[in-house]
Image (cartoon, rainbow, N blue to C red):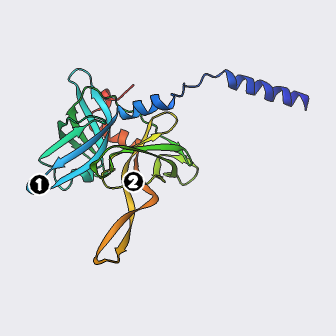
Amino acid sequence: MRGALTLAALALTGAGCVSASPVPDRGELIRGILASTVQLRSERDGGVRRAASGVVVAKDLGSQRTWIVTARHFVDPSPPEHIYVRLPGRMTVVPAVVAFVSPNRDLAIIEAELLDVAPARMKMEASLGDEILVVAFPWGQRFTVVRGIVSQVASLTGVAGPARMVDASVSYGSSGGGVFDAQTGELVGIVEGYRTAKVAIPEMKERVLEMPVAGETTLIPAPEIFHFLVDSGLSNFLPR
């Protein structure tokens, strides 16, 4: 019994000697996340406008080209005439173009020339209950930071895997917004969509509002984003 206790104590001591990656403080973590967060707007024929969010995932330091991942449905049914990118806290916008569109995933890559950005590092696997932060621009307005947890992973055999759903509530304009690990700031996925419930308005019976259902926000997980970037020829521009 004493020998077993001694071995256990040695194992714990050895485990304590393994150096762990430093965890950034909250202010540093948020600043790092915002450095890879952007707002997207598009304009189409007839004055039709859309809003979405995006995450910087790759950058070419030589040409200053920057690639932003967002949801494909932002640019569907066809590429908009004009796309603009705006950084958090900035009033100026930068023109952008659609660089790549996935044929089988709800993913698109937007290309722009941006200087003050830093590509997000990806986290390929999450665990149920992991704390996350969703950073997006709901309704095309100011960015918001919403806390939640990973509520579903793409794994049938365990509690860890690519994140597929979080319990944080989002709304229109949040599509493509980054879902970041609340401890490390790494990207676990982007917002794909959310389930809505139809709510009738008593005073206006002919109108029905579609309200987001809390806790049912679906994601495009980091591994799918990574594979799309590699397939698009951007592997050399990903953060190391």
Instruction: Look at label 2 and name its amino acid.
Output: Val
Whole-percent x, y for residue 113 in the image: 20, 30
Q: Quadrant of the C terminus?
A: top left
The total of numbered circles placed on residues is: 2
| Residues at marks 2 and 1 touching, judged by CB atoms closer than 8 Å | no
Residue located 71% across and 23% down the image? 14
The answer to which of 168 and 229 lies nearer the viewer is: 168
The answer to which of 222 and 175 lies nearer the viewer is: 175
Classify mark 2: helix, strand or loop. loop
In the foreground, 113 or 88: 88
Left/right placement of residue 34 relative to residue 99 reads right
Q: Position of residue 96 (x, y in %)?
A: 18, 38
What separation in Å lies between label 2 and label 1 (alpha carbons)?
Answer: 26 Å
> Where's residue 87, x and y in %?
28, 35
Upstream in the sequence, badge 2 or badge 1?
1
Residue that appears at 49% across and 43% down: 132
| Residue 238 shown left or right of residue 28 in the figure | left
Q: Mark 1 = which residue?
A: 47
Q: Amino acid at mark 1?
A: Gly
Which residue carries the number 2 mark?
A: 170
| Above or below for 114 versus 133 | above
Instruction: State the SS at label 1.
Output: helix
Q: Which residue appears farthest toward the right when viewing the image? A: 1
Residue found 19% across the figure and 36% down from its top: 93
